[in-house]
Amino acid sequence: MTSWLLLAEAGATAGSPEGGLFDLDATLPLMALQVVILTFILNSLFFRPVGKAVEDREGYIATSRTQAKEKLAQAERLEADLKEQLKGARLEAQKVILEAEQDSDRLYREALAVAQAEAIASRESARSKIDAQRAEALSVLEADADRLADLIVDRLLTAS
């Protein structure tokens, strides 16, 4: 690089008249070379790492967004599944409650029928016992009435 500077300096002092509109000496290629070198240095030291960081960040954002969309879709599917399961569970619970009510109503009716049958049987048993006691009492009463009638007849006949 030093040799280019020396050439540029030598070309500027040795040759052409100064003060023209364009001096076409060694400074133009030197400046072009400096721009190329500076561009290469800036590109390798600053722009490439910054560009890589920006690209990495864009990739991370894109994947995060995609993952978030997938998770949202999965959450929505799970929510729909849970709603369906809840709906099914509610229907099943209503069915179980209805069956339990029907069973309790059936058991109540059966118990009522058994109680009524027992009450009727008990009443019939009591009625038959009462009828038997009445018949026994009537037979005893008839026997007593017959005895009393015989006693009255015997006294009347003995008294006459």
Image (tube, rainbow, N blue to C red):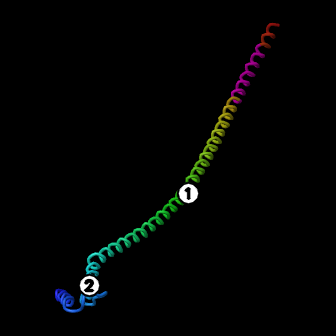
Which quadrant is the N terminus positioned in? bottom left
Residue 138 lies, with reference to residue 152, above or below; the image says below
Left or right of residue 20, residue 120 in this image: right
Secondary structure at numbered mark 1: helix
Going 45% across and 67% down the picture, which residue do you hit?
Answer: 69
Q: Earlier in the sequence, mark 2 or mark 1?
A: 2
Q: Nearer the viewer, residue 30 or 10?
A: 10
Going 69% across and 35% down the picture, which residue do you hit?
Answer: 124
Quadrant hosting residue 20: bottom left
Q: Nearer the viewer, residue 112 or 90?
A: 90
Q: Residue furthest bottom?
A: 15
The reply to whether dot 2 and dot 1 touch (C-beta < 8 Å) is: no
Residue 31 lies, with reference to residue 58, above or below; the image says below
- Identify the residue under disc 2: 31
Tell me where residue 116 appears, x and y as whole percent.
66, 38
Going 46% across and 64% down the picture, which residue do you hit?
Answer: 72
Quadrant hosting residue 133: top right
Q: Nearer the viewer, residue 92 or 18?
A: 18
Tell me where residue 37 appears, x and y as whole percent.
25, 83
The segment highlighted magenta reads 131-151
The answer to if 78 sits in the magenta stretch is no
Q: Which mark is residue 87?
A: 1
> How many numbered marks are there?
2
Secondary structure at numbered mark 2: helix
Mark 1 residue type:
Lys
Mark 2 residue type:
Met
Left or right of residue 88, residue 7 in this image: left
Q: CA distance from mark 2 to mark 1?
A: 79 Å
User: Dot 1: within a 10 Å radius of its alpha carbon, few (fewer than 14), some, or many (20 or more) residues?
Assistant: few
Tell me where residue 147 appears, x and y as whole percent.
74, 18
Q: Residue furthest right?
A: 160
Q: Which mark is residue 120?
A: none
